[in-house]
Amino acid sequence: MITRWAVRRVLLWLDGRVRIASVTRKTLAKVFPDHWTFMLGEIALYSFVSLVATGVFLTLFFEPSPAETVYTGAYGPMRGVRASAAYASAVTLSWDVRAGLLMRQTHHWSALVFLSAIVAHLSRIFLTGAFRKPREINWVIGLTMFLLGIATGFAGYSVPDDLLSGTGLRIAAATLLSVPVVGPWAAFLLFGGGFPGTSIIPRLYILHVLLLPGAIAALIGAHLAILIRQKHTHFPGPGRTQDNVVGSKMWPTYGFRSLALMCAVFAVTFGLGGLVQINPVWVWGPFRPSGATSPAQPDWFLAWVEGALRLYPPYEFRIFGYLVPAPFVPGVVMPALTFLVLYLWPWLDRRLTRGRGRHQVLDRPRDSPARVAAWAWGASFYGLLLLASSDDVVARYFQIPVFGIVRTMRIVVLVVPVAIGAVAYVLARALREDPEATLLDLRWRRIAAVIRRRPPDVEGGERRAAGAERPAASGEEGAGA
């Protein structure tokens, strides 16, 4: 009773000064759609909360300095080894700080879940047409959030200064140097001189813990504000129009559902952090400019760029007398074109479909076979590039020459996505013709249609015709009778 009275007094005091009662009442009455795909964005939100919480813990122990020191911690094989203070503090955090390894690995897994949830959320928006007017701004915000998430993940992956992250940083430096004219200047400014320099780790650390997370948090706030202002979309169904939202109220139904999802996300990320090893920096060892790890792969959100770098042939050319090295096309041009097309997609889709009105009711994916085909092509193309980033692992595991894998993947990456996109287009068109069918239903209905269209049993008909022409023996006639 005392607690309830105290809460009531505090709320009344706040309402008397900032008038929050009407806003709170309106917010708690807000309606959210019940479809499960609308929870994908919340998974990204709660993963970001997990990232911030574990990141605050890690900043208390990590030392982002390239200064050389001697490791004297609990990990025996590294004791007495000279390394940077950044690497030594990462190993110390993993082996000497209570719950340090749990927080490091949970932080890493939360980053992977965060970016995976954004991709899944953007895929749902793409397939259902939720990027159309008036929600183009939120599509741009979501893509920018994904780009900033990639940059934040790369910066955090690189600051421990281990041999694996140093190899990735070397690849990034080479890709930046491949940009004609401005590339060498940009690399010089970023690294504070030649690679690896002494400035990159502190700069990446500031980007990772302050600037990029702050920008992501601001974009999340803007995304939610626009969402509240524009209201949710919803799938077609009874009573669902362009002017309403059908679903559950924020309080109590959706609030408790969202709270349960938050607990589930925390359980998964902390469970992965405690049970599944990731990025064991003590295994890779400290970074040495003369060394490189092999096999070595980045996290999945950059692996598609790595795969493109591995598959692109060593082809160089000149533009206006300037040499364009091989990494420029797969490492700069392809990612730039990818995100340029994605940023422009709402306007490209509007021009292709002539849909210029406001859209509150979503499309089912089958309603737009071309959009499904484009998504299937993109998912398979970039998925195969991600697989190509592990060609050395595949070669080592199956004892296959790595150059044979590279030559094969160059063909597969160009041919297979087109075939998958064509199949997706055909299936989506067939499903659009039968709105109540599923893929499984479609399969059996196609088989049934083929059976219905099939001519009579040819072999049986021939046997019957041959029997009619052949004279019947007396025994056969009696048997037939």
Image: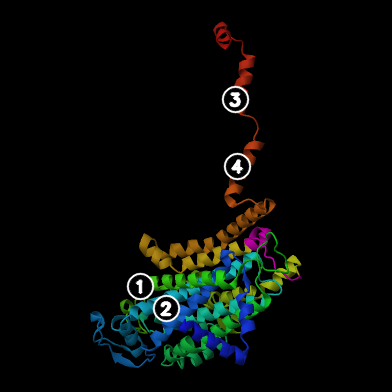
207 in the magenta segment: no
Q: Of label 4 and label 1, which has the lower sequence position?
A: 1
Mark 3 vs mark 2: give the one in front: 2
SS state under label 3: helix
Front residue of 156/406: it is 156
Q: Amino acid at mark 3?
A: Gly
Residue depicted at 38% across the width and 71% down the height: 271
The 10 Å Cα crowd at callout 2, few under 14, some 14 to 19, many 20 or more, is: many
**Alpha carbon of mark 4 to alpha carbon of mark 1: how far?**
49 Å
Front residue of 275/91: it is 275
Give the residue number, with chain letter if any, for mark 4.
Answer: 447
Give the residue number, with chain letter if any, for mark 3.
Answer: 460
Residue depicted at 57% across the width and 49% down the height: 440
Give the residue number, with chain letter if any, for mark 2.
Answer: 107
Q: Position of residue 279 (x, y in %)?
A: 37, 76
Mark 4 vs mark 1: give the one in front: 1
Q: Amino acid at mark 4?
A: Ile
Q: Of label 3 and label 4, which has the lower sequence position?
A: 4
**Alpha carbon of mark 3 to alpha carbon of mark 2: how far?**
69 Å
What coloring was used for the rendering?
rainbow
Q: Of label 1 and label 3, which has the lower sequence position?
A: 1
Give the residue number, with chain letter if any, for mark 1.
Answer: 274
Is residue 467 visible in the rendered image? The answer is yes
Is residue 313 visible in the rendered image? The answer is no
Q: Is residue 123 above or below residue 69?
A: above
In magenta, the rendered stretch is: 356-372
Label 2–label 4 contact, CB within 8 A: no
Farthest top residue in view: 474
